[in-house]
Amino acid sequence: MQTPEALKAQINSTQDLQSVVKTMKALAAVSIQQYESAIASLHHYSHTIELGLQILLSQPQFVEGALPQINHDNYVDGHLGLIVFGSDQGLCGQFNQQIAQHVGHYLDNPPFPIERHQRVAVVGSRPISLLQDQGMTIEETLSVPNSVSEITATVQDVLLMIDQWRRDKAVNRILLFYNRPTSSASYTSHSVQLLPLDQDWLGTLQHRSWENRGLPTILMAPDELFSQLVQQYLFITLYQAIAASLASENASRLAAMQSAEGNIRDRLTELTGQYRQQRQSAITAELLDVVSGFEALTGQES
């Protein structure tokens, strides 16, 4: 049985741990708001890019298949590139396990034929071993940005890697795998095809009616404008994927900290109860010693 002093030391260390958990919980909640705000801030800009593609693709010279980037046949013989977004830090529950399982399920039941020649890049070190256990070879590893201000640099690194893949390794189909938040403390795994551009989406933009009477005037060369719009679309898609993954990571960490906080609270209640019981037993023993001594003293006097 532990002494009251040992129990008091355990209570103090558990209270210190409780303070750390509360701090991490607060930081996770703040981070979720920051990353969700970053995602929301891109919605208007993303809509602007769609409008630009809409008016460009509706021009007479851009009939279906006129642009090499839109021609799906150009992507048939290329290799597949996978970009998986995880975390560098732990204490985030099943966040990395869930995205790794999602990648495995996707490749086991792909919506299109997949070659064995795959290029895999991981943003975050934690999912690497999980993906390697599934037989994947990780060719590129990038660090997870630590704040909203660092996301742009990571997006640029990913875009440079994609350009290298397409130029040197015949990778023409790029898939993104990441978790995205569904609430402040939950998330779901998601996959999106970055390249080639979605044909149905482009077709919808091409045939969508313009909302206003006056059509915008195109001042740039159409091919150059299309290339610029696609680059912006790729940037936005990657930015949103990274921000969503970071928001999900913190949502998972928030849920883990909430669970840990409950366990710590229960442990503190248990330790406090044991400490009080030990203290009461010690006080009772001291009182019994006093009573016994008093009785012995009065017995001698009589």
Image (cartoon, rainbow, N blue to C red):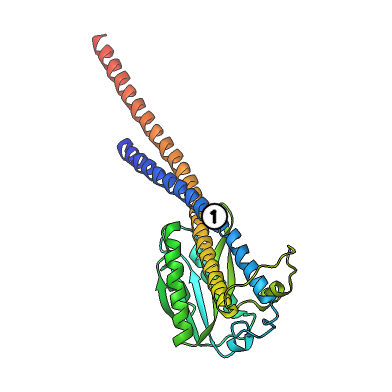
Q: Which quarter of the figure has residue 90?
A: bottom left
Q: Mark 1 points at which residue?
A: 36
Residue 21 seen in this snapshot? yes
Q: Nearer the viewer, residue 85 or 4?
A: 85
Residue type of the residue flagged with mark 1: Glu
Q: Which of 286 and 76 is in front in this view?
A: 76
Which residue is rendered at x = 54% and y = 55% of the image?
A: 36
Which residue is rendered at x = 30% and y = 20% of the image?
A: 290
Quadrant of the rendering where the N terminus is positioned: top left
The relative height of residue 36 versus residue 99 in the rendered view (above or below) is above
Give coordinates of residue 54: x percent, y percent.
67, 71
Which residue is rendered at x = 41% and y = 64% of the image?
A: 88
The relative height of residue 22 versus residue 77 in the rendered view (above or below) is above
Give coordinates of residue 177: x percent, y percent.
54, 71
Numbered label tally: 1
Q: Which of 62 and 75 is in front in this view?
A: 62
Crowding at dot 1, Cα within 10 Å, few <14 / some 14-19 / many 20+, comes out as some
Give coordinates of residue 44: x percent, y percent.
60, 59
Q: Which quarter of the figure has residue 114?
A: bottom right
Q: In this view, does 76 lie to the left or right of 282?
A: right
Residue 132 seen in this snapshot? no
Q: Is mark 1 on a helix, strand or loop?
A: helix
